[in-house]
Image: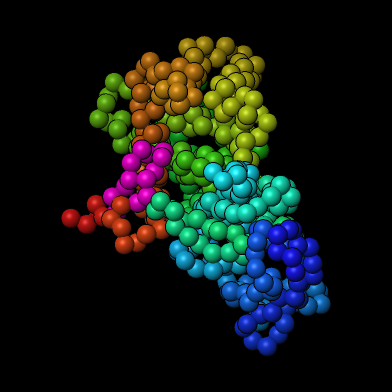
Amino acid sequence: MKPARIISRCEAISASAGTSRVVGINVWLYRMGTPGSPSRTLIHRKRPVFNAAGDGYNTAMAPERRYISELVPNESIDEVFLVRDKDLRTTKKGGLYVVATLADRSGTVTARMWDANEAIFQGIPTDGFLRIKGRTDEYKGTLQIIIEACRPYPVEKVVMADFLATTQRDVEAMWSDLLEIMRDIRDEPLRLLIKKFTEDQALVAAYKKAPAAMVMHHPFMGGLLEHTLNIAKLAKVILPLYPGLNGDLLLAGVFVHDIGKTAELTSDLAIKYTDRGQLIGHIVMACIWVQEKADLLTDELGDVFPAKTVMLLQHLILSHHGEHEYGSPKLPAIPEAFALHYLDNLDAKMFMTFNAIDTDVDPSSGFTAYMRQLETQVYKHSDKL
């Protein structure tokens, strides 16, 4: 075998567990300069794999997946990942290497393949699945994967539950709790407006499924609902403390502030922006939908929906990111808008801090790795005094 090129061959992979031999037709991409034969002994986990005849699953050989959140530095891996993105870069000495973001349902990890070339880069699918042989490493306190060999993996063999991260909470119970809080709205126009949204079955289905973000917070199926319910519960806590707040307006604002994410993001294989999400965005879409529902109520009831109510609700949507640099077209200008912004930010930051602690790769360290989103390291032991 000549090492300094892409190798395309039929590879017989010998399994070390049991006496069966698992054979697959694999087209592997090896980094340039990989010495020796590409045949490796697999790391076995109890998960179905195709048998030699290719006619089904050999459950006796079924290995158990190790998720990204379970990986530790300095271990060999042979696993399938979803490729979120990839980039071909140049070293200081002029060589090429690949940097990719890999994902499964537990999170993401950066992977590098040194001594690469354009053909290797083109052979790695984006938003597709990749089987990787390599090892884990630690770089500046963060886990990474060093790829020795890889090949595209057919989607029909993928167990999708391994890759679609979902909320750990009961979706129907969360939806019921959110509707119960919305029933506290006493203002008739606002109550009818929210009802218009909750009676839209296609929208409700998307609301229950949508992530809250691509990466920053609640980036999983059901994340939008979980995030919104958390904010609604927080709003109920602060309303008695600030009697000057219009509780009906704040609760309605909580429900619709991120509703545009049901159309902004898709999570079929990986969380990514839709065309509407890229060109319009969830903030603008939510404002449009509020006006559309108000117009429907005007047509159905024969009374003009209060323009001031629409304006104030749209202001909450437009300003809830709090700063122009974070995507808000307008800054908060009413008490309810400030409340919504800070409650939204609080829940997002709480998710990020606890997630940083839970997924940190160095259990011996008192601090997490540096979190760019939080501009700090998070101390992991404040729960124990």
Asked if residue 290 lies left or right of residue 361, the reply is right
Q: Is residue 289 visible?
A: no
Q: Position of residue 203 (x, y in %)?
A: 62, 36
**210 or 369, which is in the foreground?**
369
Specify the quadrant of the image occupied by residue 5.
Answer: bottom right
* Furthest residue toward bottom: 19
Camera-side residue of 353 and 126: 126
Residue 370 is covered by the magenta coloring: yes
Who's the residue at 57% across and 22% down the image?
284
* Residue nearer the viewer, 192 or 369: 369
The region drawn magenta spans 368-380
The image quarter in which residue 89 lies? top right
Could you tell whether 48 is left or right of 357 in the image?
right
Query: Where's the C terminus, which quadrant?
Result: bottom left
At x 65%, y 64%, the residue is 34
Q: Is residue 15 above or below residue 207?
A: below
Residue 4 visible in rendering: yes
Against 187, residue 126 (above or below) is below
Secondary structure mainly formed by the magenta segment: loop
In the image, residue 356 sits, relative to residue 341, either above or below, namely: below
Residue at figure coordinates x 53%, y 58% from the top left: 145
Residue located at (34% from left, 61% from top)? 363
Q: Quadrant of the N terminus?
A: bottom right
Q: How many marks?
A: 0
User: Residue 297 placed where, x, y %?
Assistant: 60, 20
